[in-house]
Image: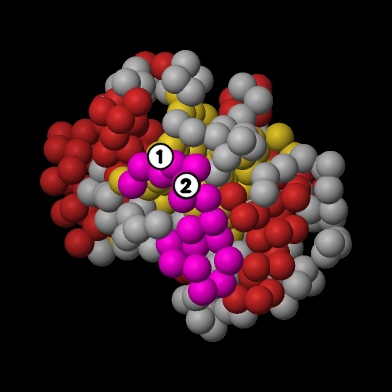
């Protein structure tokens, strides 16, 4: 087992401030949602840990990252979260709004280097145990969903393209369709991502969001001098609410991955070659 320096107290305070629970049962500390933890749902977000492995705890396999190191990191982080690394189910993320339904027969798809991910998609849903849904991030928002009644879970990767494509709403609708989930019963966690503070955007984002949200678009656009900044967390909360999720059931992190680049991988802050952190969720072992 790889051991890591424990991340600094200041970062832990950040995690507490956003309502997240810091898990210290392992050498690594995964960030968790207070709401999902209260439900007993196995889940967690990996982080950037300076000095850990070859690439500070990266779990992405894509070049220029070292897949063997990333697989070791996946195993370490899975131990911290309490899931089996060979139960991971990954997708080939496309910045779209595609949702794929996974079963326990898919466990391991995209888990290890060289293993083909389940499908090209940006959201994964399941109502089975024995598998762990994983999405990878570096500024793009992770969204975890849980239907405690069915039960069922989902992991979503929402960058700006996925946001304006309403991948969040598409995921809720897929859970309704596949599992008879009731949107009002869903618990949602919108995790750390690039904040409006650091996310100056161009006309493509603004136009895409205005088309998606219509008159409500202003809630996620902020004018800073001559520039426009996009608030992906407010946008995705609004999209989840539009799909029927109760606002009281949506927990939103206030951690900006660029502002807190020491603890999170940030595409804007560190460049395209930076690592990836993961969001994982599971209904448990078989
Ligand atoms: Zn920021």
Magenta segment: does it hold 101?
A: yes
Magenta segment: does it hold 172?
A: no
Q: Does residue 69 appear in this view?
A: yes
Start-end of magenta stretch: 100-117
Q: Which mark is residue 202?
A: none
- Mark 1 residue element: strand
Q: Quadrant of the C terminus?
A: top right
Residue shown at the point (84%, 42%) measured from the top left: 25
| Label whose residue precedes the other's in the sequence (1 or 2) | 2
Residue shown at the point (54%, 56%) measured from the top left: 108
Q: Quadrant of the N terminus?
A: bottom right
Q: Does residue 270 appear in this view?
A: no
- Mark 2 residue element: helix
Task: State whether residue 223 is above or below residue 38.
Answer: below
Q: Which residue is disc 2 drawn over?
A: 105
Residue shown at the point (54%, 83%) measured from the top left: 64
Asked if residue 91 lies left or right of residue 85, the reply is left
Residue 255, percent from left and from top:
58, 46
The secondary structure that most of the magenta stretch takes on is loop
Task: State whether residue 114 is above or below residue 86.
Answer: below
The reply to whether dot 1 and dot 2 touch (C-beta < 8 Å) is no
Q: Which residue is disc 1 drawn over?
A: 125
Asked if residue 225 lies left or right of residue 76, the reply is left
């Amino acid at each position: 087992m790889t051991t890591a320096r424990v991340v600094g107290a200041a970062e832990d305070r950040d995690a507490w401030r956003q309502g997240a629970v810091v898990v210290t049962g392992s050498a690594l500390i995964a960030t968790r949602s207070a709401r999902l933890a209260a439900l007993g749902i196995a889940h967690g977000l990996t982080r950037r840990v300076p000095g850990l492995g070859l690439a500070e705890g990266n779990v992405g396999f894509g070049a220029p990252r070292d897949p063997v190191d990333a697989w070791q990191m996946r195993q370490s982080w899975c131990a911290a979260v309490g899931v089996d690394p060979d139960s991971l189910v990954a997708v080939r993320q496309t910045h779209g709004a595609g949702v794929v339904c996974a079963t326990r027969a898919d466990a391991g798809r995209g888990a290890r280097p060289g293993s083909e991910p389940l499908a090209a998609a940006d959201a994964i849903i399941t109502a089975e145990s024995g598998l762990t849904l994983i999405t990878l991030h570096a500024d793009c928002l992770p969204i975890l969903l849980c239907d405690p009644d069915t039960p069922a879970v989902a992991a979503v990767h929402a960058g700006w393209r996925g946001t304006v494509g309403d991948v969040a709403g598409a995921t809720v609708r897929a859970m309704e369709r596949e599992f008879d989930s009731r949107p009002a019963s869903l618990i949602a966690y919108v995790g750390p991502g690039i904040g409006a503070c650091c996310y100056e955007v161009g006309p493509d984002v603004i136009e895409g969001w205005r088309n998606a949200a219509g008159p409500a678009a202003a809630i996620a656009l902020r004018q800073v001098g001559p520039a426009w900044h996009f608030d992906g967390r407010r946008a995705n909360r609004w999209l989840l609410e539009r799909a029927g999720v109760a606002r009281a059931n949506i927990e939103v992190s206030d951690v900006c991955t660029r502002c807190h680049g020491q603890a999170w991988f940030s595409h804007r802050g560190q460049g395209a070659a930076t690592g990836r952190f993961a969001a994982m969720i599971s209904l448990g072992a078989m």
